[in-house]
Amino acid sequence: MRFRALFPVIIAVATLLMVGPTLLQAQEASPSAAGGSILEAYGEAWSSGEATQVSALYTEDAVREDIPTATTSRGRAEIEALAAGLFETDDDVRLEVTGGFVGETWAVMEWTFSGARKETAGEVTFRGVSVIELDNGLISRETDYYDLPQMQQQIAAGGTPGALETPTGGADATPGAGTTAEQTGSVTVRVYTCPAEMSQASGQGQLDLAELIAGCTPLETPETVPTLRTLTDGEPMAGTTTEPGVYVWEGLAFGDYAVGGTGEMPADLSGLLVMDDSGAPLQNPTLHLDAMSPHVEFHDFYFLAEATPAA
């Protein structure tokens, strides 16, 4: 399973953070296939203002996962669009790699991000860690970790770089207030019904997202229609049904949202599993839309109840 494969990487990240920046900076990064250090190239690309320079670091089918906001960019084109959105709304974007190391097929880096919103010149600076997998010197998968609450506190104090933006008024403001058309995103929720025998296996983590999608069918009933609301006492918003079991909300102001339901679970269903687009299970589905993560997708898997034996 993917979680087992990542366990040694997570241990390595924890070890690096405990030993401190002196040891990190003393490690000599091995060169990538393109020459030079991927760590140096990463910092230079995200500080360049050129989206194509960023996307050139990634394979065509690369996956970039942002853990704090539970969002994923898939493919070089989506990653380039993400970078373009950041550079369009922000001045003085800098990503300084402060430490890390490179192996043959993976790397770990510590970095500091800073940026200034063009409209307000408000600044935000925060630190993070990225774990990347390499394929012939290019990034095939990236997983980012950083302190989201710390970042939001700075935003509320006046800093509003586009990549980190919340609506005017700070992190507790209602999305929609004081936003422009370019500061909007979308949410998609896909709803499925699954055989009863899949319930236990999914609960034990034995089925990944692809296996669940393959073994389940789209579900469209009034009781399982999802709703979306702003995280601070917002009214439930109905999505648009684009195909059976698929609900979409577009033109959403950047900010924080929660996904819920419209009613009680039907009697023929016994459980619900919610996953984000990376396959991570979610207990209380919430999401954050911003220029770095303008599109979020969730999957709702409802499991049929076990048939009651005849008396």
Image: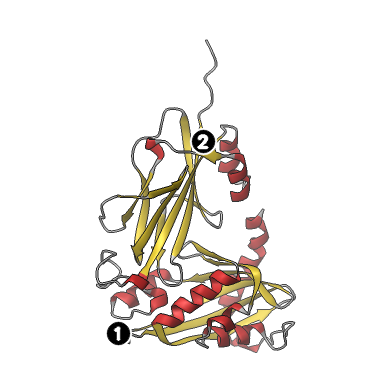
The answer to whether residue 228 is seen in the rendering is: yes
Q: Quadrant of residue 212?
A: top right
Circle 2 residue: 303
Residue 278 vertical placement versus 254 (above, below): above
In this picture the colour scheme is: secondary structure
Point 26% across, 73% down: residue:
168
Residues at marks 1 and 2, CA–CA distance in whole angstroms:
49 Å
Q: Secondary structure at mark 2?
A: strand
Placement of 69 over or under 81, stated as above or below: above
Which numbered circle lies on residue 60?
Answer: none
Is 26 on the left or on the right of 49, as rendered?
right
> Which mark sits nearer the N-terminus, 1 or 2?
1
The quarter holding residue 25 reads: bottom right
Q: Amino acid at mark 2?
A: Phe
Q: Residue furthest top?
A: 311
Where's residue 77, x and y in %? Answer: 57, 71
Q: Position of residue 24 (x, y in %)?
A: 61, 84
* Numbered label tally: 2
Residue 157's spot in the image, x, y percent? 28, 78
Residue 125 shows in this picture = no
Q: Is residue 31 left or right of residue 177?
A: right
Q: Residue at x 33, y 81 (%)?
A: 159
Disc 1 residue type (three-letter): Thr
**Dot 1 surroundings within 10 Å: few (below 14), some, or many (20 or more)?**
few
Q: Nearer the viewer, residue 187 or 11?
A: 187
Question: In the rendered image, which residue does mark 1 sit on?
Answer: 120
Within 10 angstroms of label 2, few (less than 14), some, or many (20 or more) residues?
many
Which secondary structure lies at badge 1? loop
